[in-house]
Amino acid sequence: MATTQPDRSPRVANREQRFQPAEVSNYEIVSHYFTTAADRLGLQDDVRAVMSSSYREVQVQVPVRQADGRIHVYSGYRVQHNGARGPYKGGVRYHPDVDLDEIRALAQLMSWKTAVVNIPFGGAKGGVNCDPSQLQGDEVQQITRSFIDKIEKVLGPTRDIPAPDVNTNAQVMAWMMDEYGKLHGHTPAIVTGKPISLGGSYGREAATGRGIVLCFREAAPHLGLTPPDTRAVVLGFGNVGSWAACILQDLGAKIIGISDVSGAIHHEAGIDCHALREHLRHGGRLDDFDDVEPISPDELLALDCDVLIPAALGGMIHAGNADLIRARLIIEGANSPTTPRADEILSEKDIEIVPDVLANAGGVIVSYYEWVQNLQHFTWDEREVNDRLGTRMRKAYREVRSRSTKDDVPMRVAAFELGIERVVDVARTRGYI
Ligand code: NAD
């Protein structure tokens, strides 16, 4: 068995207003879970070497002329981890902490995720190390177009298909599609998560959040929970967190705590998530929303609740704060939110975890449907998209759950094993390994 990676986060109360990620990198987190599953599968060293490294890593300069007339050079990355099961697929994030190691880890995670939910894609990820909150005028558009110009040679509807992730959205995807189209002609299937008017799919924006709620509905009966008697806490209120919260609230659950990069809030009777989303959309802050009590990130984690949905960045549940958690179920909306040491602590506390590679796969599933619709020049209505999403998520959940029960391992181990096994199997059949 692999040894647990050291988690160097201090065990002290966190008085900062935003969550402090662990000092364990996303790469260390993903490598640890990969190694645990690869050991259990008895993967040979040569196969392991292929599966744990990237097929291709591209790093490019992204020069942008700022509002003050000076040029700033950002770094852009696209990592293609494994394409045995189909074209590379994965989001692009804009965040100051983006570096090659992080994108490498997230690309690998995508390979296992697309395999766990059995869609015909490989795994990739991209990013630019910019801070969108500091950008002005059309700088986000310039960064997007410049980045696509630099990496277009490794993209294509049958090669590699980007999508939204942290700080990127449908508008950014529209610019990507437009820039790629200048070089290759009109190609809607080059990105997913586009605006509906440009070939985006109904249901894509909500899909990751909806997938999280589908996992909740599968897990809830085992814990004796029904939506109306469920109290949830959501860490991160962007695309994934806000949709998960709103859909859960629509089922009757109370969302009693929410956080974003600016801080955290609590309201025991339940926060109106739809109204909060509107409030934020119109420039409001989390802590000036009606009737809520501002709390610290540690107090948020310590709330007495049934479900915790981490939906911000990686490493936010770590050795320094895992012990505070009182939820019975954690559904990982974010990628690699839980460090290996935190995973052990939560397991000792008997807290069930639905892992990222299953829980947040709703987005890539509907991205797959968007790509299929684009290739067919055809549009499905929202009900059809959501029905197909539900069928695929439930099947994947039950496959992972039954493997976890049969082998008496956590769902994370079962999911990683399933994903790795499927990729290795196809790579062997193709003669790649
Ligand atoms: P987003 O940019 O829309 O939202 C991110 C949220 O996290 C924001 O509310 C932000 O304020 C919050 N946040 C950032 N730093 C924080 C901090 N230090 N403390 C507390 N909150 C903080 O991004 P998203 O698309 O919702 O992605 C969130 C997570 O879900 C990421 O890990 C992403 O990789 C993963 N994910 C996204 C999708 C998707 O379809 N967008 C799919 C699968 C997984």
Image (cartoon, rainbow, N blue to C red):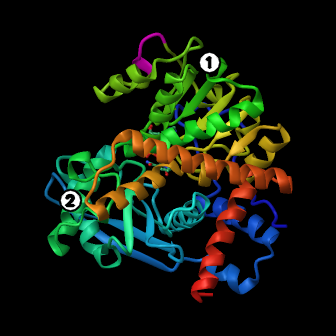
Does the image show residue 170?
yes
Q: Quadrant of residue 305?
A: top right
| Residue type pointed to by label 1 | Pro
Q: Quadrant of residue 384?
A: top left
Q: Which mark is residue 431?
A: none
Instruction: Tell me the residue that label 1 is attached to.
Output: 228
**Residue in the picture at 40% in, 69% down:** 77
Vertical order, 364 against 286 (above or below): below
Q: Magenta region, mostly helix, strand or loop?
A: loop
Instruction: Tell me the residue that label 2 is attached to.
Output: 142
Residue 5: x %, y % from top left: 75, 60
Residue 350: x %, y % from top left: 82, 38
Q: Does the magenta-highlighted stretch encompass residue 169? A: no
Q: Secondary structure at mark 1?
A: helix
| Quarter of the image where the C terminus is located | bottom right
**Left or right of 118 in this view: 163:** left
Residue 241: x %, y % from top left: 49, 36
Magenta residues, start to end:
287-291
**Residue in the picture at 23% in, 66% down:** 187
Foreground pick, 117 / 27: 117
**Residue in the picture at 66% in, 82% down:** 49
Does the image show residue 93?
no
**Residue in the picture at 49% in, 47% down:** 389
Nearest to N terminus: mark 2 or mark 1: 2
Q: Does the magenta-highlighted stretch encompass residue 290? A: yes
Measure the C-alpha gap from mark 2 to mark 1: 46 Å
Q: Ligand 1 within 8 A of label 1's CB?
A: no
| Residue type pointed to by label 2 | Gln
- Neighbour class for label 2 at 10 Å: few (<14), some, many (≥20)? some
Q: Secondary structure at mark 2?
A: helix
